[in-house]
Image: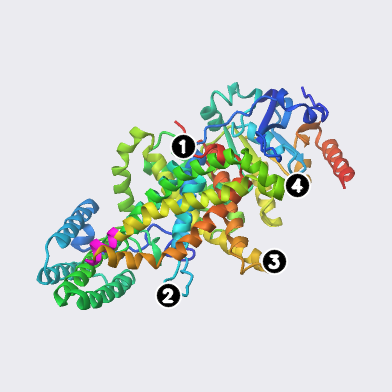
Amino acid sequence: MIALDDVLVTAYSPDPAGGADRVVRLLGPVTLELVEHRVAIVGANGSGKSTLARLLNGLVLPSSGTVRVNGLDTARDGAAVRRTVGFMFTDPDAQLVMPTPVEDVALSLRRLPMTPAERDVAARAALDRFGLADRAEVPVHALSGGQRQLLALASVLATEPAILVCDEPTTLLDLRWRGVVDALLADLDQQVVVVTHDLDAALQADRVLVVDDGSLVFDGDSAQAVAHYRALMQVRA
Amino acid sequence: MTSAPDNETAAAPAVALPAPIARSSVTTDVALISTFAAFIAVCAILPGIPTPSGVPITLQTFAVILAGLVLGWRRGGLAALLYVVLGLAGLPIFSGGVGGVAVLAGPSVGYLLAFPFAAALAGVLAGWALRTAERLRSSSLADRLTARYGDGVGRAPSAWRYPLLVVAGLGASFLTIHPAGIVGLMVRLGITLPEAFAIDVVYWTGDVLKNLAAAAVAVAVFKAFPDMLRSRR
Amino acid sequence: MSGPIRPPWAGPLGLYHPGTTVIHRAPAGLKLAFLAMFAIAVVAVRGPASALAFLGIALLAQLVARIPWHRTTRGLVPALVTAALIGAYQWWARGWATALEVSVDLVALVLLGAVVTATTRADTLLDALARLARPLRHVGLSPDVVALSVGLFLRTIPVLARMSLETRDAARARGLDREPRAILVPAAVRMVAHARATGDALAARGLGEN
C-alpha cells in the first residue's frame, strides 16, 4: 500500500533577475492512499504528474510530509523502498545501461544473493518471458524502440518488485508496440501505477488521479476522471 | 482521503515553502562520469576537421576540457581517467580508432596521459572562474557596465562566466596537455625541447578555438541545468 | 550471434583476434608485465643494433601469435608514418644511427603493444583492471561501481553517436549546419540531460546503493 501524508515537493529555481535562487512549489500538499490494483495518473506536461510518480519510489523526496510504501518511509528506507517499487521510464535509452540485454537484466539481479551463473540463467529466463530470448546477446542499440522498452520492463520485473510505477511507458512507441506493452502491464500480478497521456489506457484503470499545476484536482472513477481531464484541457485550448 | 487545494499555494511567498530535499547523487555522478568519458571517445573517433595548417583538429581535447568545466575536478578527472584506462585496455577509442597499450609506445603518449590531469585542473580553475564571475557580477564594475550597456551585459551570469571559463580551459590545457605532450615527444622521438616545442605549437590555434567552444558549451549547460552549478565537485 | 555485427567501437571485443597460440593463452597480467619490461629496455638500451634486436622480438611475437598482418597494420600505419617522418628528420639532424634507433624502437614498441592487444580479450583485460581497482573501495569506489561505469560507457557511445547525428540533422533542417554552436550546444545539453535521466534510472533500479 502506498500512503502520502501531507506531501509537499519544492525545488530551487534561479531568479531571472540574478538574485539568489528561489524555492518554488512543484507538487502538493497531497494526502493519498493508493490500494487499487491499477492506478493511472493523467495531467498536462509540467503539471507535476511525473513528480508524483517519482515520489513513490524515493526518486524524488518530499520537502515536507511523508511517503510510505508498505510501511517503509521513502526518505529513510530508500534502498528497501526501491526493492519494493520497480520504476519504468519513458525513454528506455536512459534506463538500459549495459551493452547487451542479458547483461542489463543480470545487472538488476546483482542485488539478489546469486552466483554469476545463476544470475545468467535467471536473466535469460526473464528475457524469455518477454519474448526476447533470441535477442539476449544482440547489442541494445540494435534493438527496435519497442524491443528496448520490453527489455526495460524485463529488467525492472526481473527482481519481482511488489509494485510497478511507469512514467509514460508508451509515449515513444508506435501503435503496435503500445498495444503490446499495455497488454503486458495489464497482465501483471503487481500493483501498477501508470503516468500516461493515453486516455484509452487510463480508462482501463481502477482509479485515476488528475494532476494540474502541482495539485491533485480530481481523484476517482476512471470514466469521470477522464471526462474531467478532457474538460480541463478544453478550457485551456 | 484526498486533499486537493486550489492554486493559492503556488502564489504563496517563497519563504513559506520548505527547502527541497536532495536525494543522494551517487548514481547521477556515475552516469555523468561514464557519459562524458563516452563523449571524449566519440569526439576522438570522429574524423578530424582539416585545417589550413595541415594538422587536422579532433574534438578530443574539447571534450576533455568540457568534462572538467562542467563536472568539476573530481568527476571530470574521473571521466577522462575512465576514457584513458579503457582505451589502454584495448577498446579502439583513441584518435584514429586505435586502442591498447601500444599507444603508450607512440609519440602522442604525453598528450594522452595528461587528459585526466587536464580535466581535473580545468575543474579546479572553473570553480574559481564561476565564483569570480558571481563576485564580479555584483561589483561596481558590473554597475557601470549595466548603466552603459544594459542588464544583458552587466547582470547576465553568462556574460561574466564565459571569458573566465575560457581562461580556465586555456590554463588547464597549457599547464598540463602541452607540457606533457612535449615531454612525450622528446622521449619517444629522441628530439630536443625546441624541436618538440616546434611540433607542439602547430596545435595551438586549434586548441584556442576548442577552448572558446568548450567555455561556450559549458555556459549553455549551466544555463540549461542551473543545479549543475550547485553539484560541481 | 544473431543480429547485426557489432561496429568496432560498440563491443568489448574491439581489436581482439581470436586464437589458441601460447601468447593467446598467457595470463593478461603476465603479458602486460612483459610489455612494460620491454618498453623500459627499449628506452634504456641505446644503439641501432639493439633497436633491430627489439624489432626482431616484436616480429617473432607477431609470428608466434599467428596474427594476420592486416589486423595489426590498422594500429601500425600511424606509427609507421611517424617513424618515417622522424627517421628522415633525425637522419638530417643527427645522422643515420640515431635515425635508425629512434624509428625502429618506435615501430618495435607499437608492434608488440598491438600483439598484446590482439591476443588479449578486452573483457579479460577489464576483469584484470577490476581486480586492480579493488583497493579503490577504500576511497569509496566499489568494484560494482567500476563495473557499472564500464558497462555504461560502452552503452553510451552508440547513444551519443546517434544523438550527434540527430542534432546535426536538426541544425541542417534549420539551415544552421555551418554554425558550430548550433550543433555543439544542443548536442551537449541533450547529452547532459541523457546522463541525468540515466542517473535517475540507475537510482530507480536500486543500483549504486549499499
* Residue A154 in the image: above or below residue A26: below
Give the label, 4 or 1, closer to the camera: 1
Query: Residue C42's x, y, as percent?
Result: 16, 62
CB contact under 8 Å: marks 4 and 3: no
Residue bearing mark 2: B54
Looking at the rendered structure, whether the residues under marks 1 and 2 are on a common chain is answered as no
Residue A130 seen from this side: no
Q: Judge left or right: residue B6 versus residue C5.
A: right
Residue bearing mark 3: C174
- The residue lying toward the viewer, choosing from A210 and C133, is C133
Looking at the rendered structure, whether the residues under marks 4 and 3 are on a common chain is answered as no
How is colour applied across the structure in the image? rainbow
Q: Amino acid at mark 1?
A: Gly
Q: Amino acid at mark 4?
A: Asp
**Is B188 part of what is drawn in magenta?**
yes
Looking at the rendered structure, whether the residues under marks 1 and 3 are on a common chain is answered as yes
Q: Which residues are magenta?
A: B183-191
Q: Amino acid at mark 2?
A: Gly
Q: CA distance from mark 3 to mark 2?
A: 31 Å
Give the label, 1 or 3, closer to the camera: 3
Q: Judge left or right: residue B78 versus residue B135.
A: left
- The residue lying toward the viewer, choosing from B157 and C67, is B157
Residue bearing mark 1: C208
Instruction: Tell me which chain the residue with mark 3 is part of.
Output: C
Q: CA distance from mark 1 to mark 3?
A: 41 Å
Which one is earlier in the sequence, the residue at label 1 or at label 3?
3
On residue A198, the disc is 4
Q: CA distance from mark 2 to mark 4?
A: 56 Å
On residue A15, the disc is none
Q: CA distance from mark 4 to mark 1?
A: 33 Å
